[in-house]
Image: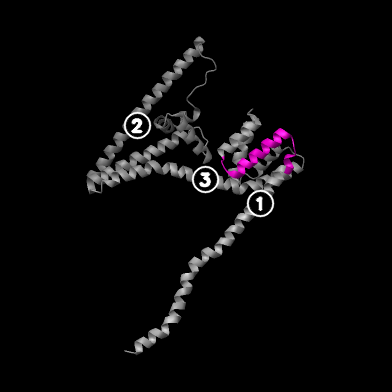
Amino acid sequence: MDLWMLLLLIASLVYAVTWMVMRQVFRDQERQLAMERLKVRTGLLQDFKPRKEEGYQRCNWCALGRTLGPTNLKEIASVQQQLSRAGFRQPNAFGAYFFLKYVLVFGSALVTVVLWSWWAISPIWLIGVPTVMLLLPERVLIYLGNNRLACINMQLPDFLDMSNICMNAGLSYMVAMKRVTQELREIAPEVCSEFDYLLDQIQIGVPRTEALRQFAERNPTKDIESLVQMLIQNEKLGSSISEAINEFSRRMYLDREQVMQEKAAKTSAKMALVIMPFLMIPYLILLLAEQMVQFGRSF
């Protein structure tokens, strides 16, 4: 009972401190917003845009995580790129990531301190567990990003083939890609979401070349970079995009076929390492059985 009372007391203190920090953060934000509105009213500031986004108004914990996150612009850009690569583009994804990260760190530190004080566990756990929890979210985010990029590479040839069919039917390649994203959204959600985001950027006024470059930055794979370079060259030269996409998808299929053939050629050597011990054991038994029987009869 004493242990549960101690845990309840610690949890209450953590909640109280978090609530006070959140209250102070929102007070500072409201004060800054009021100052900016005053500057707009007096003509000292033009094109006022509130810094408190709608997602953070609904998610207080995400606002706290954004406050606890890094302030260096390079670190912020790196984390946002990893989140975007993993498919998290919501306004509150950045704050939610750091809130979850620090909750895991402080929660694991609290649990290990309680276990150390009550059951005298090794002090190494006091340092090891919070350190692992500090590094774990980043590794999970990198894993999700790599897995998503692999899914996009796997779904890209089929997407391009269907887009080529639509272009041969008379549609422009932008309209064809938009149609294919609507048709394949349930089958290939990763690649469809990326092309849908690309088309939305172009629709709101981002230059097509710049949108394609951002598309390659969000998905840093060899196939995506080759596709973007091919589309940019066709955009500048004015050549047939349908033929270029058809040739590109055919080259992707040939590359995959070569990779599969290489893996199949390596399979026999890898299987030999596994099968060899099971083949040698019966052979040794047959080879040595007669000698062992004769050696036993000699006694």
Residue occupying image coordinates x 38% and y 28%:
22
Q: Label 3 vs label 1: CA separation?
A: 21 Å
Q: Which is more N-terminal, label 2 or label 3?
A: 2
Mark 1, mark 2: which one is toward the viewer? 1
Question: What amino acid is at disc 2?
Answer: Thr
Question: What amino acid is at disc 3?
Answer: Asn
Provide the secondary structure element on which disc 1 rests. Answer: helix
> What segment is highlighted magenta in the picture?
219-243
Q: Which is more N-terminal, label 1 or label 3?
A: 3
Instruction: Name the residue nearer the viewer: 153 or 27.
Output: 153
Residue 195 picture location, percent across and down: 62, 39
Residue occupying image coordinates x 39% and y 25%:
25
Instruction: Name the residue nearer the viewer: 240 or 50.
Output: 240
Residue 6 picture location, percent across and down: 25, 41
Circles 3, 1 touching at the beta carbon (< 8 Å): no
Residue with the mark numbered 2: 18
Can residue 31 be seen here?
yes
Instruction: Name the residue nearer the viewer: 4 or 253.
Output: 253
Provide the secondary structure element on which disc 3 rests. Answer: helix
Residue with the mark numbered 1: 253
Q: Which is more N-terminal, label 2 or label 1?
A: 2
